[in-house]
Every structure is written in C-alpha cells, then in structure tokens.
Image (cartoon, rainbow, N blue to C red):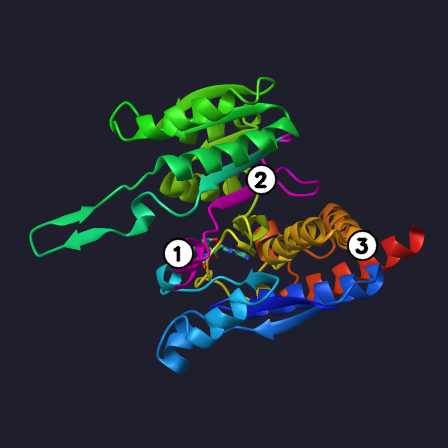
Amino acid sequence: MANVISVIPGDGIGPVIVKSAIKVLEATSEIYGFKLSFVEAPAGDAAKRDFGEPLPKSSFDKIRSSDACLKGPVGETAKDVIVFLRQKLDLYANIRPFKTLPGVSSKWKDVDLVIVRENTEDLYKCVEDVGEEHAVALMVLTKKACLRISNVAFQMAESRRKKVTLIHKINVLRSFELFRKAALEVARSYPSVIIEEMLVDNAAYQLVTNPQRFDVMLTTNMFGDILSDEAAGVVGSLGLAYSANVGDEFGLFEPVHGTAPDIDPLYANPIAQIMASKIMLEWLGRKKGNAAMIEAANGLENAVFYLLQDSKSLTPDLGGRATAEDVTKRLIDVLLKERCKL
Ligand code: NAI
C-alpha cells in the first residue's frame, strides 16, 4: 500500500523547491521499489488569499490523516501554520543536522553537529499581551517537555560522538533551572554521554569560531531557531539546511529556511527541501519497518553529496548558475546511475 505524504507547497520559493523534492521522491521510490502517494494540503499566505485562512481545516485534516508531511516554507503566516502544527500535532522535537559538505565552500572542514530544539513551548507558545504602552510575552517551559526533548538529545548523542551541549541563559533567567534540572536528570541514564553547559551568547560565538567542538546542541525553542540559521551559515548555505519536526506519532519535514523573498524562485536551491525528504524517508522507513525506504534515503544522500562535490549543477547561493530544475534533473540522473552500479 502506498504511504500517503501530505504536501504543503508553501509560498515564495516553496512551490519550486517542493516540486523538485516530489520529482526526486517519485524517481527514488521507483528506483528503490516502494510506493508513495502525494496529497496537496494548501497552507500559508497563498492559502489565506485563496481560502480566507492560512491553514484551512481541509488541509489540516489531510495532514493529520497522512503518514507524514512534507512542508515547503510559508511566508508571513508562518506562525499560523508551522508553529500551530508543531503544537497541535505535538511535534516536540525539532532535529536540525549541520555538516560541512564536499564541494561546499566553508571556512571549516569537519563540522558535524545536530541542533535538538524543543519545539512546542518557550516564547513561541505565543502567550502575549500587547498594548499601546506595553508588550509581554511569556516564556513557558514544562518539566514534561524538558525531559522528553532531553531524552531525544541524549539518545542521539549515544549513537554519535557522545556529547551534549546544554544551551540556556540561566545567569539571567531562573526559569532555565527547570530545563537544566531535567537535562541533568536525563543525563544520569546515559553515562557514556558527556554533558557540558553553555550560555546561549557564548554558544553563538563558539558556533562561528570553533564549531567542531559541538556534537548535539540541546536547547529551547527560540534559541534553537536562531542558532540554526547561524549553523547553516557556518556550513555553507541556508539552502542546504533541513529539519525534522517529530513527535511520538507523526513527523513533518521541512527546510530550515523561509520563503527567500529576495531571490528568483527559479534559482532557489532545492537541496534543503530534498534533504528534508531524505529524513522523511528515513523516519517513515524506521516507523514502517521498510528497509527499501531507508536504503533509498542513504542513496539519496549519497547522490546529493556527489552532486555537490562534482559542482556542475550548483545554484547561485553555492556559487553556481544552475536553476532548481537543473539540480533536480542532475540529481535524478545521478540517482539512476548510482543505483545501476549497486
Ligand atoms: P529566509 O530564511 O527565507 O532567507 C534568508 C536568506 O537565505 C535569504 O538571503 C535567502 O535568499 C536565502 N535562502 C533561503 N533559502 C534559500 C534557498 N533554498 N536557496 C537559496 N537561498 C536561500 O529569510 P527570512 O527573512 O527568515 O524569512 C522570509 C519569510 O519566510 C518570512 O515571511 C518568514 O515568516 C518565513 N519563514 C518561514 C519558515 C517556515 O515556513 N518554517 C521559516 C523561516 C521563515
């Protein structure tokens, strides 16, 4: 039976890069022998314009009843779409890997880190009171959320270089003590993992001056949001940065970046969206016990690395002149050839 993927094309460069990702997924599923079907779930600025609301109920129902969601970036309505979906579907872990890649210009050679960001609370709970003379936004943290995100981070570190950096701002805000206590409690169950603590301002500095020191960076919602764009810059381009929003039951996969309103969508880098599809396949493959999907995810990642290294089809953010469509065609070509070699 086909796995149903709900698809949010999004705004700005969204429809272009999502189209690329779907073409690549179609080719991948054919090559590796599994079935996907796609159902479009309009959301974002265009949906607000066309249907009067940024996330129509029909789209939400399609997303909720699908096996996974592939989401393109949405524009000014991001809060009503992605922040809402993360909270409503309890997608509490935002996992954002950053790695220096072959062929991608970066000051660093060997960065390999993952930001594990709590995805449902903090200031993005959006508990606000805004008046003419004042504005208040509450930072909400609960023990439950701190414990479960810490578990995700430590579990991940166990299968990597066994180090978690806990990032907070405890010297100013006592509230972070809850987060810290939860992380230290979880750490006791993972004796092979080293835990270090770092204030977020220092973490921002270390990320650009000494990024190799990080393995898993565990942090709260807004800090994770900001540090992710910085990490993307460290390894080369936001056009390569992808993320998984996962809970216990469901997963939504998207690029880290937004709609890139300053560029021609035809020249957008589709790789972040394609790599978001790659981790979607990994997640689905593990959830459904489908080895072909996991193999396909590996194949797709290798094809992306190959394409970056041979640097014949790079978009302008990586110093090339290729369009998103050029990258897509070349990637499918590489995928076909690589599979033939196996
Ligand atoms: P952005 O993240 O869209 O772009 C920042 C910079 O990176 C720009 O110079 C852009 O050209 C470049 N860039 C981003 N993606 C690229 C790609 N695939 N290829 C080449 N270059 C790329 O910028 P900003 O200002 O944070 O957001 C713009 C809009 O996107 C806003 O309306 C915001 O609300 C929305 N947004 C939506 C998100 C989501 O749907 N999850 C996440 C972040 C922003």
Q: Which residue is mark 1?
A: 83
| Near-viewer residue (319 or 269) | 269
Question: Among all residues in the image, which is located at the extreme bottom?
Answer: 50
Distance of label 2 from label 3 (alpha carbons): 25 Å
Viewer-nearest of discs 1 and 2: 1
The x, y position of residue 89, in whole percent, is 46, 57
Going from N to C along the chain, the mark reached first, 2 or 3, is: 2
| Residue type, numbered disc 2 | Phe
| Residue type, numbered disc 3 | Ala
| Near-viewer residue (108 or 41) | 41
Q: Which residue is mark 3?
A: 292
Distance of label 1 from label 2 (alpha carbons): 22 Å
| Residue type, numbered disc 1 | Val
Question: Among all residues in the image, which is located at the extreme right?
Answer: 341
Vertical placement of residue 337 versus 224, above or below: below
Which quadrant of the render holds ligand 1? bottom left
The x, y position of residue 275, in whole percent, is 64, 52
The x, y position of residue 292, in whole percent, is 80, 54
**Label 2: element kind:** strand
Q: Label 1: how many residues lie within 10 Å, few (<14), some (14-19) or many (20+)? A: some
Magenta-drawn segment:
81-110
Residue 326 falls in image quadrant:
bottom right
Going from N to C along the chain, the mark reached first, 1 or 2, is: 1
Indicate yes or no: mark 1 CB to ligand 1 under 8 Å: no
Please say whether residue 39 is one of the residues in the magenta stretch. no
| Near-viewer residue (292 or 254) | 292
Horizontal side of 293 relative to 47 (left or right) equals: right
At x 39%, y 42%, the residue is: 221
Vertical placement of residue 210 versus 3, above or below: above
Q: Label 3: how many residues lie within 10 Å, few (<14), some (14-19) or many (20+)? A: some
* Residue 163 numbered tag: none
* Residue 98 numbered tag: 2
